[in-house]
Image: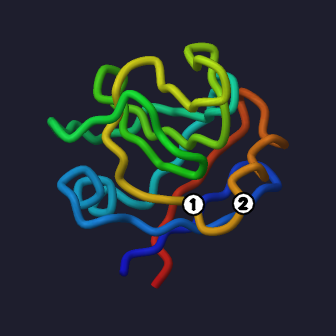
Amino acid sequence: MRRIKITAGKVETSAQLNDGPTANAIWNALPLSARGARWGKEIYFSIPVKVKDHDTHEVVEKGDLGYWEPGNAFCIFWGPTPASRGAEIRPASPVSVFGKIEGDAAVFDAVTSGTPVKIEKIK
C-alpha cells in the first residue's frame, strides 16, 4: 500500500494510492509542491506529470484523488463543483481516479485558492 501526506496550508491529511498507471506516475514524481486553486469543493493544481489513462470517470466520490489530463492537474474532490448536477461530484471533464483521502475530505473546506499544497510520500 502506497500512502501520501497532503499538506494544504494548515490542513494535513493522508491518502492511499491505487495501483494504476496514473498513481504510479504521480508516486514517482513525489514530492510535489504547488499553489492550489478552488473550484467548488475541489482543489486542483498542475503537476509535472503527463499520463494518458483511458480509465476516466465523469462523476467521482467524496475523497477521490483525480488526475485531469487536459491541465496535467492533481485534483482533490470532497463535494459538488460548478459542473455538478445536484449532490453529485462532477469534475470539469473526466478524470482518472488514482487514490482516496483517508478520513473526512471535508477538512479541505478550510483551504482557499492560492494556498500552498505539498504532496509527499509516507514511508
Q: Position of residue 60 (x, y in %)?
A: 47, 39
Above or below, 21 relative to 115:
below
Query: x, y (%) of residue 73?
Result: 41, 33
In the rendered view, does 35 fall on the left or right side of 49?
Answer: right
- Which residue lies at the image location 39% right of the left edge and 60% below the top edge? 30
Residue 101: which disc?
A: 1
Asked which quadrant contains residue 52, the reply is top left
Cβ–Cβ below 8 Å for labels 1 and 2? yes
Q: Residues within 10 Å of mark 2 (few under 14, many from 20)?
A: few
Q: How many marks?
A: 2
- The residue at the point 67 percent across, 65 percent down is 13
Apparent side of residue 42 relative to residue 18 in the rendered image (left or right): right
Q: How far is the residue under mark 1 from the one under mark 2? A: 7 Å
Residue 39: image quadrant is: top right
Seen in the picture, residue 16 relative to 68 is either above or below; the reply is: below
Q: Provide residue 116's location: percent of width, then percent of height.
A: 67, 42
Q: Secondary structure at mark 1?
A: strand
In the image: residue 15, left or right of residue 50: right
Question: Is the residue 119 above or below the residue 122 in the image?
Answer: above
Residue at image coords 38%, 76%: 2
Query: Residue 63 in the image: x percent, y percent?
Result: 58, 52
Depth order, front residue of 23/8: 23
To which residue does mark 2 refer? 104
